[in-house]
Image (cartoon, rainbow, N blue to C red):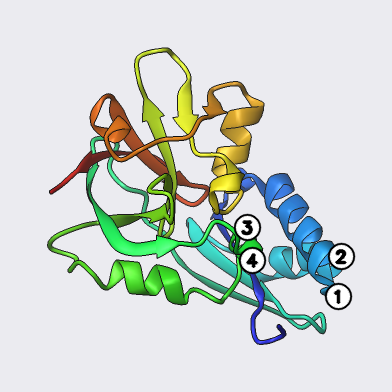
Amino acid sequence: MTDFSLIETLRFEPETGFVRLRLHLARLTRSARRLGFAGADATEAQLREAVRGAAGPLRVRLTLDRHGAIAVTTAPFAPLPDDAVWRVRIAATTIDSSNRLLRFKTTRRGIFEAARSEFSSAEADEVILLNEKGEVCEGTITSVFLDDGSGILKTPPIACGLLAGVLRAELICQRRARVSRLSPADLECGDLYLGNSLRGLIRAKLGV
Protein backbone atom coordinates (compact mmCIF):
# COMPACT_ATOMS: atom_id res chain seq x y z
CA MET A 1 0.00 0.00 0.00
CA THR A 2 1.68 3.18 -1.20
CA ASP A 3 -1.25 5.44 -2.05
CA PHE A 4 -1.31 7.43 1.18
CA SER A 5 0.75 9.84 3.26
CA LEU A 6 1.18 10.29 6.98
CA ILE A 7 -0.43 13.39 8.49
CA GLU A 8 0.15 15.53 11.56
CA THR A 9 -2.12 18.49 12.34
CA LEU A 10 -0.63 20.89 14.87
CA ARG A 11 -1.55 24.10 16.60
CA PHE A 12 0.95 26.96 16.58
CA GLU A 13 0.84 29.88 19.00
CA PRO A 14 3.26 32.79 18.35
CA GLU A 15 3.97 33.24 22.07
CA THR A 16 4.65 29.58 22.91
CA GLY A 17 5.34 27.80 19.62
CA PHE A 18 3.90 24.46 18.53
CA VAL A 19 1.54 22.76 20.98
CA ARG A 20 2.65 19.20 21.85
CA LEU A 21 5.36 19.27 19.18
CA ARG A 22 7.43 16.54 20.83
CA LEU A 23 4.50 14.13 20.88
CA HIS A 24 3.56 14.90 17.27
CA LEU A 25 7.11 14.31 16.04
CA ALA A 26 7.42 11.12 18.08
CA ARG A 27 4.22 9.72 16.58
CA LEU A 28 5.25 10.66 13.06
CA THR A 29 8.71 9.14 13.48
CA ARG A 30 7.29 5.94 14.95
CA SER A 31 4.71 5.63 12.19
CA ALA A 32 7.27 6.29 9.46
CA ARG A 33 9.58 3.64 10.87
CA ARG A 34 6.85 1.02 11.11
CA LEU A 35 5.50 1.71 7.62
CA GLY A 36 8.87 2.15 5.92
CA PHE A 37 8.48 5.85 5.12
CA ALA A 38 11.60 7.99 4.65
CA GLY A 39 12.20 11.61 5.64
CA ALA A 40 10.68 11.91 9.11
CA ASP A 41 13.89 13.44 10.48
CA ALA A 42 13.45 16.48 8.22
CA THR A 43 9.93 17.38 9.30
CA GLU A 44 10.70 19.60 12.30
CA ALA A 45 12.79 22.00 10.23
CA GLN A 46 10.02 22.21 7.63
CA LEU A 47 7.44 22.94 10.31
CA ARG A 48 9.48 25.73 11.83
CA GLU A 49 10.11 27.31 8.45
CA ALA A 50 6.40 27.26 7.63
CA VAL A 51 5.49 29.38 10.68
CA ARG A 52 8.39 31.81 10.52
CA GLY A 53 7.07 35.31 11.20
CA ALA A 54 3.53 34.17 12.05
CA ALA A 55 1.62 36.83 13.97
CA GLY A 56 -1.39 34.80 15.08
CA PRO A 57 -2.49 31.26 15.95
CA LEU A 58 -2.25 28.77 13.10
CA ARG A 59 -3.55 25.35 12.13
CA VAL A 60 -0.56 23.60 10.59
CA ARG A 61 -0.97 20.45 8.49
CA LEU A 62 2.06 18.35 7.55
CA THR A 63 2.09 15.35 5.22
CA LEU A 64 4.92 12.90 4.62
CA ASP A 65 4.78 10.39 1.78
CA ARG A 66 6.58 7.07 1.46
CA HIS A 67 9.47 8.61 -0.47
CA GLY A 68 10.12 11.36 2.08
CA ALA A 69 8.33 14.23 0.32
CA ILE A 70 7.07 16.73 2.89
CA ALA A 71 4.29 19.28 2.45
CA VAL A 72 3.26 21.85 5.07
CA THR A 73 0.22 24.13 4.84
CA THR A 74 -1.00 26.71 7.34
CA ALA A 75 -4.30 28.47 8.01
CA PRO A 76 -5.49 30.92 10.68
CA PHE A 77 -6.86 29.14 13.74
CA ALA A 78 -9.67 30.32 16.02
CA PRO A 79 -10.08 28.34 19.28
CA LEU A 80 -13.55 27.23 20.33
CA PRO A 81 -15.22 29.18 23.16
CA ASP A 82 -14.61 27.65 26.60
CA ASP A 83 -18.32 26.91 26.96
CA ALA A 84 -18.66 25.18 23.58
CA VAL A 85 -20.63 21.90 23.56
CA TRP A 86 -20.51 19.75 20.45
CA ARG A 87 -23.53 17.78 19.26
CA VAL A 88 -22.44 14.19 18.63
CA ARG A 89 -24.06 11.28 16.81
CA ILE A 90 -23.03 7.63 16.38
CA ALA A 91 -22.38 6.44 12.83
CA ALA A 92 -23.79 3.34 11.18
CA THR A 93 -20.39 3.03 9.47
CA THR A 94 -18.18 0.76 11.57
CA ILE A 95 -14.46 0.24 12.04
CA ASP A 96 -12.76 -3.13 11.53
CA SER A 97 -10.60 -3.49 14.63
CA SER A 98 -8.21 -5.81 12.74
CA ASN A 99 -7.31 -3.04 10.25
CA ARG A 100 -3.94 -2.01 11.68
CA LEU A 101 -3.61 0.95 9.31
CA LEU A 102 -6.28 2.71 11.38
CA ARG A 103 -3.69 3.00 14.15
CA PHE A 104 -1.76 5.47 12.00
CA LYS A 105 -2.87 8.97 11.00
CA THR A 106 -2.93 8.91 7.21
CA THR A 107 -4.61 10.49 4.21
CA ARG A 108 -6.58 7.28 3.72
CA ARG A 109 -9.73 8.61 5.37
CA GLY A 110 -12.56 7.00 3.40
CA ILE A 111 -14.19 5.36 6.42
CA PHE A 112 -14.16 8.61 8.40
CA GLU A 113 -15.55 10.61 5.48
CA ALA A 114 -18.32 8.03 5.09
CA ALA A 115 -19.22 8.32 8.77
CA ARG A 116 -19.17 12.12 8.69
CA SER A 117 -21.43 12.17 5.62
CA GLU A 118 -24.18 10.32 7.50
CA PHE A 119 -25.16 13.55 9.28
CA SER A 120 -25.29 17.16 8.18
CA SER A 121 -23.41 19.87 10.04
CA ALA A 122 -26.77 20.98 11.45
CA GLU A 123 -27.32 17.51 12.93
CA ALA A 124 -23.86 16.89 14.39
CA ASP A 125 -20.57 18.65 15.03
CA GLU A 126 -18.77 15.30 15.21
CA VAL A 127 -19.59 11.65 14.59
CA ILE A 128 -18.39 8.68 16.69
CA LEU A 129 -17.55 5.33 15.09
CA LEU A 130 -17.98 1.91 16.69
CA ASN A 131 -16.09 -1.24 15.73
CA GLU A 132 -17.57 -4.53 14.53
CA LYS A 133 -18.11 -5.56 18.18
CA GLY A 134 -20.15 -2.46 18.96
CA GLU A 135 -17.37 -0.89 21.05
CA VAL A 136 -16.76 2.85 20.98
CA CYS A 137 -13.63 3.74 18.98
CA GLU A 138 -13.17 7.41 18.07
CA GLY A 139 -14.64 10.40 16.30
CA THR A 140 -13.84 11.25 12.71
CA ILE A 141 -11.29 13.84 13.89
CA THR A 142 -11.20 13.32 17.66
CA SER A 143 -10.50 10.88 20.46
CA VAL A 144 -13.32 9.96 22.86
CA PHE A 145 -13.16 10.55 26.62
CA LEU A 146 -15.72 9.79 29.32
CA ASP A 147 -15.83 11.28 32.80
CA ASP A 148 -17.75 8.75 34.89
CA GLY A 149 -17.17 10.62 38.14
CA SER A 150 -14.08 8.66 39.17
CA GLY A 151 -11.77 11.62 38.57
CA ILE A 152 -9.95 9.96 35.67
CA LEU A 153 -11.20 10.08 32.09
CA LYS A 154 -11.83 6.80 30.30
CA THR A 155 -10.73 6.45 26.67
CA PRO A 156 -10.97 3.39 24.38
CA PRO A 157 -7.85 1.20 23.95
CA ILE A 158 -5.94 1.13 20.66
CA ALA A 159 -6.90 -2.55 20.28
CA CYS A 160 -10.47 -1.47 19.51
CA GLY A 161 -9.17 -0.17 16.17
CA LEU A 162 -8.30 3.48 16.62
CA LEU A 163 -5.63 6.13 16.30
CA ALA A 164 -3.16 6.84 19.09
CA GLY A 165 -4.18 10.49 19.38
CA VAL A 166 -1.60 13.00 20.60
CA LEU A 167 -3.92 14.62 23.16
CA ARG A 168 -4.99 11.14 24.26
CA ALA A 169 -1.35 10.13 24.77
CA GLU A 170 -0.64 13.26 26.80
CA LEU A 171 -3.63 12.75 29.10
CA ILE A 172 -2.72 9.10 29.68
CA CYS A 173 0.90 10.03 30.47
CA GLN A 174 -0.34 12.67 32.91
CA ARG A 175 -2.61 10.03 34.52
CA ARG A 176 -5.62 12.17 33.73
CA ALA A 177 -7.00 9.39 31.50
CA ARG A 178 -6.82 5.61 31.34
CA VAL A 179 -7.85 3.08 28.72
CA SER A 180 -11.18 1.32 29.13
CA ARG A 181 -13.51 -0.34 26.67
CA LEU A 182 -16.69 1.69 26.27
CA SER A 183 -20.13 0.92 24.88
CA PRO A 184 -22.60 3.47 23.49
CA ALA A 185 -24.64 3.00 26.69
CA ASP A 186 -21.60 4.00 28.77
CA LEU A 187 -21.50 7.36 26.99
CA GLU A 188 -24.88 8.20 28.50
CA CYS A 189 -23.69 7.50 32.06
CA GLY A 190 -21.23 10.35 32.50
CA ASP A 191 -19.86 13.51 30.96
CA LEU A 192 -18.69 13.02 27.39
CA TYR A 193 -15.70 14.82 25.92
CA LEU A 194 -14.06 14.72 22.52
CA GLY A 195 -10.64 16.08 21.80
CA ASN A 196 -7.58 16.38 19.65
CA SER A 197 -4.28 18.19 19.85
CA LEU A 198 -5.52 21.11 17.76
CA ARG A 199 -8.59 21.97 19.83
CA GLY A 200 -8.01 20.31 23.20
CA LEU A 201 -10.92 18.78 25.15
CA ILE A 202 -14.42 19.68 24.02
CA ARG A 203 -17.59 19.00 25.99
CA ALA A 204 -20.02 16.91 23.97
CA LYS A 205 -23.65 15.85 24.12
CA LEU A 206 -24.78 12.62 22.48
CA GLY A 207 -27.81 13.01 20.24
CA VAL A 208 -30.33 10.47 19.04
**C-beta proximity under 8 Å, tags 4 and 3:** yes
Q: Which residue is mark 3?
A: 103
Task: Select label 4 or label 1 by which is in front.
Answer: 4
Identify the residue at the far front of this view.
Answer: 133
Q: Earlier in the sequence, mark 3 or mark 2?
A: 2
- Mark 1: secondary structure: loop
Amino acid carrying label 2: it is Asp
Amino acid carrying label 1: it is Ala
**C-beta proximity under 8 Å, tags 3 and 1:** no
In this rendering, is residue 134 above or below 28? above
Task: Give me the C-alpha separation between circle 4 and circle 2.
Answer: 22 Å
Residue at 77%, 51% in the rendered image: 26
Q: Which residue is mark 2?
A: 41
For residue 15, say whether it is visible. no
Depth order, front residue of 112/42: 112
Residue 188: image location, x then y, percent: 23, 31
Depth order, front residue of 33/19: 33
Q: Which residue is mark 1?
A: 38
Q: How many marks?
A: 4
Image-quadrant location for residue 7? bottom right
Amino acid carrying label 4: it is Leu
| Residue 101 circle label | 4
